[in-house]
Amino acid sequence: MRLTVRCRSSNVEVIKQFANWLLDIGERNLGGPNDGQSIVDIPDDLLILISSDPIDDLLQFVYPDILDRFIELTYFQDQALLAPLNEVVQEIIDRILALFPSNKVEYLSSDSLDNAETVF
């Protein structure tokens, strides 16, 4: 991850500490010896402590003013959400898409070609 690209120099050290913390989690250096499960303390500034809708709070934090700024070319380049499961990713995508006033359109694809002789 290139967390410090286009970042203010005052934030670089904080971002490096966060990146190292993430690497330590991935390399199982936090939480003591474990068999694939461990307890890792997450800093308070990364937690949504009390909320009736934590996903909405997360979206508001990561994508502030999304309805006013989504048209900006670089708006989504500066933010990202990481999720451990595809189901969580899909829920977040569904919640973001539900914010935009529009008609739903579904595009289908095919993994194979029809063997019909007629070519259109």
Image: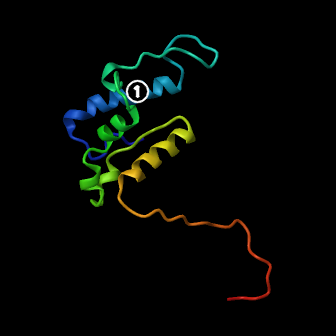
* The quarter of the displayed image where residue 41 is located: top left
Disc 1 designates what residue? 20
**Quadrant of the drawing holding the N terminus:** top left
* Residue type, mark 1 in image: Asn
At horizontal 28% and vertical 53% (from top left) the residue drawn is 67
Residue 38 point in image, percent of width and height = 55, 15
Q: How is the image coloured?
A: rainbow
**Quadrant of the drawing holding the C terminus:** bottom right
Q: Residues within 10 Å of mark 1 (few under 14, many from 20)?
A: few
Task: Give left or right: position of 13 versus 39.
Answer: left
Residue 16 point in image, percent of width and height = 33, 30
Q: Count numbered badges in the picture.
A: 1
Task: Give left or right: position of 105 versus 62.
Answer: right
Q: Element type at marker 1?
A: helix
Relative to residue 47, is residue 4 depicted above or below? below
At horizontal 60% and vertical 13% (from top left) the residue drawn is 34
Residue 26 point in image, percent of width and height = 52, 27
Task: Give left or right: position of 66 versus 108.
Answer: left
At horizontal 30% and vertical 60% (from top left) the residue drawn is 73
Residue 49 point in image, percent of width and height = 34, 21
Task: Give left or right: position of 83 versus 15.
Answer: right
Q: Nearer the viewer, residue 61 or 21?
A: 61
* The quarter of the displayed image where residue 62 is located: top left
Q: Nearer the viewer, residue 91 or 26?
A: 91
